[in-house]
Image (spheres, rainbow, N blue to C red):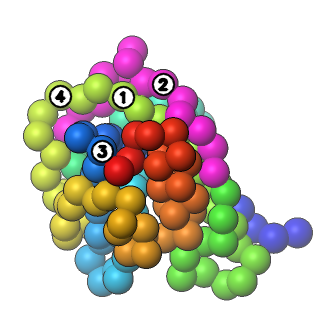
Amino acid sequence: MAATIDKIAWIHLDNGRILSTRSRGKDVYYIPGGKREPGETDLDTLVREIREELAVTIVPATARHLGTFQAQAHGHAHGVMVRMTCYTADHQGTPVPSSEIEELVWLAYRDRDRVSPVDQIIFDHLHRTGRLH
């Protein structure tokens, strides 16, 4: 049975663009978020990862499940999948690169080829639903 990486992601949209991040040493952009630690709920992981990566505070009461998406994990052996559970949520503070994050960018649908495979599926979903231009 193939391994699945369980990740939680924050979908932050503004004027038809999505906030994306690039980690040090990586060549593609990723929607911010990360892997669950033992015992964490989705919301626990979302709050912790976004605080660590972007130095902002997610407002837990505003978190809404947007969807769960799965694809081949970028940079991993064939058959290793990533399952990305995505949430929208309000936040406090201004996102800035923190921890392993080197760069923040606002991407549009035309930037789809610059993101990981699972993010491409998310971009397609957001574009089809009119949220990503």
Q: Residues within 10 Å of mark 1 (few under 14, many from 20)?
A: some
Return the mark for residue 89: 1
Mark 2 or mark 4: name the one nearer the start of the chain.
Answer: 2
Instruction: Give the residue at x 48% y 25%.
Output: 64
Along the horizontal axis of the image, is 51 left or right of 95?
Answer: right
- Report helix, strand or loop for mark 1: loop
Q: State how far apart marks 3 and 2 are (Cα).
A: 18 Å
Return the mark for residue 64: 2
Horizontal and vertical percent position of residue 1 = 88, 69
Along the horizontal axis of the image, is 4 left or right of 34?
Answer: right
- Foreground tag (2 vs 4): 2
Residue of label 4: 92
Q: Cβ–Cβ below 8 Å for labels 2 and 1?
A: yes
- Circle 4: residue type: Gln
Q: Cβ–Cβ below 8 Å for labels 2 and 4?
A: no
- Report helix, strand or loop for mark 4: strand
Residue of label 3: 16
Q: In which quarter of the image is residue 112?
A: bottom left
Mark 2 or mark 1: name the one nearer the start of the chain.
Answer: 2
